């Protein structure tokens, strides 16, 4: 059986002391900010709505699709942080659609609309946590439609 090697024998430095007071201050700061999460996620949804509206008013240009895709990407990264994990999951599905888009004018607006509407509903209804049955179902359906769309694009480009 191998001999236990102490950290001194192994040449590593001893573990740094953990400042429990600093951890408590950080946790308190996060808790204090939590009250702002709702307004922050609402602002992100507002920006997504603007980019979404631009898809219809300016058309499916590369610039408009890129701007919209960036807003979706931001929500993918921020949804869970702001206590809305279903926003993150819906935005992940939307980002996957946008990332594999063959051409900007091929973006299926009805599928985009469904994703945007779902994120709006999650935020409007304050659906937090990841155990909401209807939201799980919606995420599954959206992801399935994205997968089907991507498969169709792959088939079309390989033909």
Image (cartoon, rainbow, N blue to C red):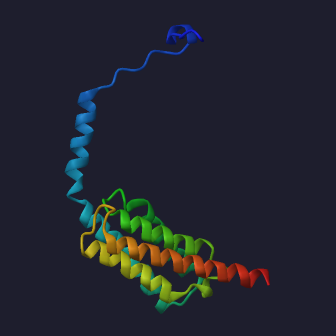
| Residue farthest along the front direction in this orientation | 1
At horizontal 50% and vertical 12% (from top left) the residue drawn is 7
| Residue farthest along the right direction in this orientation | 159
Q: Position of residue 89 (x, y in %)?
A: 43, 66
At horizontal 33% and vertical 77% (from top left) the residue drawn is 120
* 115, 56: nearer the viewer: 115
Task: Answer with left or right where residue 155 lies relative to residue 119.
Answer: right
Q: How many labels were placed on the picture?
A: 0
Q: Quadrant of the N terminus?
A: top right
Q: Vertically, is 139 above or below 80?
A: below
Q: Vertically, is 118 above or below 41?
A: below
Task: Answer with left or right where residue 66 lies relative to residue 125.
Answer: right
At horizontal 50% and vertical 71% (from top left) the residue drawn is 93
Q: Vertically, is 65 above or below 32?
A: below
Asked which quadrant contains residue 48, the reply is bottom left
Task: Answer with left or right where residue 115 lies relative to residue 83.
Answer: right
| Residue 124 visible (yes or no) | yes
Q: Position of residue 43 (x, y in %)?
A: 31, 70
Asked which quadrant contains residue 21, the reply is top left
At horizontal 29% and vertical 64% (from top left) the residue drawn is 40
């Amino acid at each position: 059986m191998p001999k236990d090697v102490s950290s001194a024998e192994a040449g590593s430095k001893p573990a740094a002391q953990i400042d429990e007071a600093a951890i408590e201050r950080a946790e308190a700061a996060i808790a204090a900010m939590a009250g702002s999460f709702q307004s922050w996620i609402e602002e992100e949804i507002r920006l997504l709505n603007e980019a979404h509206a631009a898809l219809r008013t300016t058309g499916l240009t590369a610039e408009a699709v890129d701007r919209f895709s960036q807003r979706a990407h931001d929500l993918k990264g921020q949804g869970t942080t702001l206590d809305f994990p279903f926003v993150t999951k819906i935005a992940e599905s939307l980002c996957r659609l946008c990332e594999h888009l063959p051409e900007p004018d091929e973006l299926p607006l009805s599928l985009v609309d469904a994703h945007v509407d779902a994120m709006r509903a999650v935020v409007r209804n304050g659906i937090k946590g990841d155990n909401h049955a209807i939201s799980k179902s919606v995420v599954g359906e959206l992801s399935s439609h994205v997968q089907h769309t991507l498969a169709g694009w792959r088939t079309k480009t390989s033909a």
